Amino acid sequence: MSSSIDALPLAPVANDFHPTPEPDVPDTDPDAIPELTFYPTTDDADRTAALKLVADSIAQQRQTASRALLSHPLHIALFVAVCSLLGRWLFLLRGELGVALSTVGGLTMGVLVVIRWAVAPYIELAEGVHPELLEGKEVVIAKYGQEVIGAAVWGWMDEGKKKKGRKAEVVAWTVRLKYRGKGIGVGLLETVVDEVRGKGGEGVGMVEGGIYSKRVLWNVYNGVFERREERAKRALQATWEARAGGNTRRKR
């Protein structure tokens, strides 16, 4: 005989449990490699970041100038000669090894202080980079994810000339220090060339007497800067010639 309980209608069971909604998780992969993009920009934040990169690149010329002073053959020979004379006089003649070592150490510190003083004007040059540099100029940036890692500033050589047949000049071109030697600079030049060609330009070159042309040392120490400028000119010329037959433009 069936139980009377089996005949009772089944009523829905009250359930006050409501699952907690999961928080929105951004659709990003923390292990994903950031995208590298090259593009012209009119955004104030991007242009400010580009200007800061330019100023930093001028300040970093201190390091190059310091190496030029430290590695000059005449300076090395003079330093070794002075240290040898002091060492001979203090140690061989007077037998004071500790004093000799202390004197050579003090002389070394003095040389480093003089070199630091000699290259200090590069800081003043960097501080002199103001937003006026970008007035009437186009800015191209390289962006790695959300970080601006490279910039190029260019403009027309003759603003009063008709657009057809105009030539452009690159005023500044730099890449953040840790990203140099990875092709970022070439990508910037390619984007500049594409922009110039797209606006009807018939040529582009590095500006003469620009912000990178100012020197604080005597000419005998500036060979490394001259060679660097020549390489930049050749790189830009090679990029123009390589892109002259194509019309592919980088996009963001």
Image (spheres, helix red, strand yellow):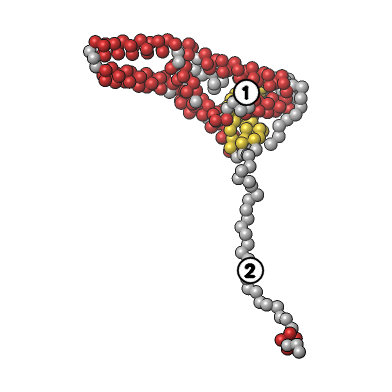
Give whichever of discs 2 and 1 has the lower sequence position: 2
Q: Position of residue 172 (x, y in %)?
A: 59, 25
Judging by the rendered image, the residue that carries numbered circle 1 is 170
Q: Position of residue 5 (x, y in %)?
A: 71, 86
Tell me the CA gap for discs 2 and 1. Answer: 63 Å
Q: Residue at 29% x, 20% y: name it.
A: 102
Answer yes or no: is residue 128 visible: no
> Which disc number belongs to residue 226?
none
Q: Toward the viewer: 220 or 86?
A: 86
Q: Toward the viewer: 221 or 7?
A: 7
Q: Position of residue 245 (x, y in %)?
A: 77, 22
Rendering quarter of residue 79: top left
Quadrant that contains the C terminus: top right
Q: Secondary structure at mark 2?
A: loop
Judging by the rendered image, the residue that carries numbered circle 2 is 18
Rendering quarter of residue 110: top left
Q: Residue at 64% x, 20% y: name it.
A: 235
Amino acid identity at mark 2:
His
Amino acid identity at mark 1:
Val
- Would residue 150 be found to the left or right of residue 241 on screen? left
Quadrant that contains the N terminus: bottom right
- Up-down relation of residue 25 to residue 12 (above or below): above
Q: Residue at 46% x, 26% y: name it.
A: 123
Count every numbered label the image shows and give the total: 2
Answer yes or no: is residue 187 visible: yes
